[in-house]
Amino acid sequence: MAIEVRIPTILRNYTGGAKAVSAEGATLDELISNLESAHPGIKERLVDQGNLRRFVNVYLNDEDVRFLGGLGTPVADGDTVTVLPAVAGG
Amino acid sequence: MLTISQDLVDRIIAHARADHPDEACGVIAGRGGVPERFVPMENAERSPTFYRFDSMEQLRVWREMDDRDEEPVVIYHSHTATEAYPSRTDISYASEPDAHYVLVSTRDEQDVEFRSFRIVDGVVSEEEVRFIP
């Protein structure tokens, strides 16, 4: 069992083009570190100075993790984590 | 080049006018690079100088596109006091290299500017827009 992580187009160069990969961990932070070991470079695109990057949305199942516990959010086998770059500008 | 129906153009402009002086934003979903389905989005910032899709609405719309085998062919937003050209923040947050970034300016009440760009790795290139009936 593992956690499915859905990868947006712009980060698929880290996953060999895969739209979804699997990873493990008890929290989102651990999951991202586990992702980094298999797909080096991806963590920096998601995390900056110990926090989720402001213009990257990360969802656990149907919830934005900002409304859960950020990087400390617990995750479990069978969950789906979705990464979407925020659509924003000025 | 962006080829887009006049009806979709009219809907983008109507949305931009309705939300003026705040910026309006949204997506035209489609397949194979053809813009088809108009999806106006909420500007979570409700600001005359900034826009951001509401994160929960974005998840719902992106899933819907996935289920329908669509992609965000056009990502549009308005500038309400400046020209229809990507700002520095537009360039730094652009994250859909395959999308046509459409900008409209509502600064002139009589006339509307409608322009389209590609934004890839921080590089902006304007493209021709072909309007079809």
Image: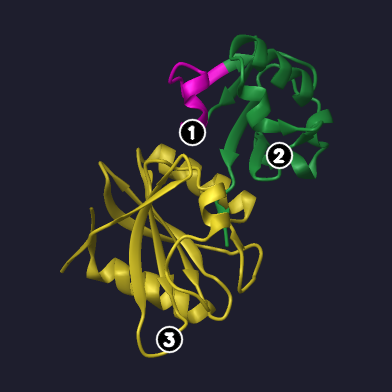
Residue receiving disc 2: A53
Give x and y (percent) for residue B63: 49, 41
Give x and y (percent) for residue A78: 65, 19
Q: Are marks 2 and 1 on the same chain?
A: yes
Amino acid type, mark 3: Asp
Colour of chain A as rendered: green
Mark 3, secondary structure of its residue:
loop
Amino acid type, mark 1: Ile
Residue receiving disc 3: B108
Bin the neighbour count of mark 1 within 10 Å (Cα to Cα): few under 14, some 14-19, many 20 and up.
Answer: some
Amino acid type, mark 2: Arg
Depth check: give the residue in front, B13 or A13.
A13
Residue drawn 46% across and 32% down?
Answer: A9
Q: CA distance from mark 3 to mark 1?
A: 35 Å
Residue drawn 43% across and 64% down?
Answer: B85
Tell me where the magenta segment starts and ends, as one range.
Answer: A8-21
Residue receiving disc 1: A10
Bin the neighbour count of mark 3 within 10 Å (Cα to Cα): few under 14, some 14-19, many 20 and up.
Answer: few
Q: Is residue B105 above or below residue B102?
A: below
Q: Nearer the viewer, mark 3 or mark 1?
A: 3
Colour of chain B as rendered: yellow
Q: Quadrant of the N terminus of chain A?
A: top right
Mark 1, secondary structure of its residue:
helix
Give x and y (percent) for residue A51: 79, 35
Give x and y (percent) for residue A24: 70, 13
Q: Which colour assignment does the render follow?
A: by chain
Q: Is residue B74 left or right of residue B90?
A: left
Please tell me the numbered disc located at residue B95: none
Mark 2, secondary structure of its residue:
loop
Depth check: give the residue in front, B2 or B29.
B2
Q: CA distance from mark 2 to mark 3?
A: 36 Å
